[in-house]
Amino acid sequence: MPLLKRYILLLLVLSIAAPASASPEEEITFAISPMASPVSTLSSFSDFIAYLSKKTGKKVVLKQRRKYSDINSLLKSGEAQFAYTCTGAYLSGRNEFGLEVLAVPVINGKTTYNSYLIVNKESDIKDFRQLKGKVFAFTDPMSLSGRIYPAYLLETMNTTPEKFFRKTFYTSSHEKSVESVAYGLADGAAVDSLIFEDMKRMKVPATAMVNIIQISPPYGIPPIVVSPGTDKSIKQIMLSSLLKMKDDPSGKEILKQLQIEKFVLPDPAIYHSAVQMRQAAMLP
């Protein structure tokens, strides 16, 4: 056999025998929304992402975005397969492109949370109506607890944020909303009860500088969501990893860091009241 033919044959044999691991490792992108400030979110979730990488056998990559709409854009395009996002963003994504809930966290024995309406502790304001003509901080346009709930209250009063408040602004973080009220940048704000209580547990000074003047009814808790185009086998392996965390020593420790007791299968009924409120507030 001519030398050239023998060389070509050898290359073919080597290419066929090459191990499958030589192909690029498949990545899963997990997006995190600004439920907490970017720094604390990354710190809290780095071990969580590393755990999911180990249990799924896939390289799970963390992506952070400041706005809930940016998280939804990643999920809609398939650039992210999973996300831990807010209830309002989930409902918006469900209506727009079929976003699905994969699992929900259980926190303090519940799969619900509330919106807290807060004012500065030195303020004379005791009622939401007294915020008329004042400065109000929203978290994000899609945030159920940080915008939709107060917007709904104003709708029941036949008014709008633009007419009722002297000025509004967005903080992109529940923590920053609390701090805005504590340090006098806003007269009032609406924040996620889970984030507020976590800040309180960590003795963040700003929490001692505000008063809660109103608590919303309970709404379905912020979920883990999955892009509708995600491969079923990937969805199943991620779901299995999340549900089994509570029974795994390392998983249990990570859940403890996140102040989560466990992940469970979603009950669609817990989101009905949030859907009704969004509709009453005339949101798509």
Image (cartoon, rainbow, N blue to C red):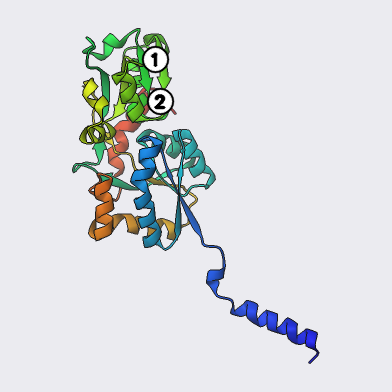
- Quadrant showing the C terminus: top left
Residue 217 location (% of width, % of height): 23, 28
Q: Residue 244: where, in percent of width, then height?
A: 28, 58
Residue 201, visible in the rendered structure: yes
Residue at the outermost left position = 109
Residue beneath the point at 31% across and 18% down: 183
Which residue of the protein is positioned furthest toward the top in this rendering? 133
Amino acid bearing label 1: Pro
Q: Is there any visible trace of residue 263 in the rendered image?
A: no
* Callout 2: SS: loop
Per the image, the residue denoted by label 1 is 161
**Camera-side residue: 71 or 275?**
71
In the image shown, does 141 or 39 lie closer to the viewer?
39
Above or below, 248 relative to 16: above
First in sequence: mark 1 vs mark 2:
1
| Position of residue 282 measured from the top left corner of the image (x, y, whole percent) | 41, 23
> SS class of the residue under badge 1?
helix
Residue receiving disc 2: 171
How many numbered marks have been drawn onto this rendered protein structure? 2
Disc 1 to disc 2, C-alpha distance? 16 Å
- Is 218 displayed left or right of 179 in the figure? left
Q: Is residue 175 above or below residue 23?
A: above
Q: Are marks 1 and 2 in contact (CB under 8 Å)?
A: no
* Residue density around tag 1, few if under 14, some if 14–19, many if 20 or more, within 10 Å: some
Residue mark closest to the camera, 1 vs 2: 2
Q: Amino acid at mark 2?
A: Thr
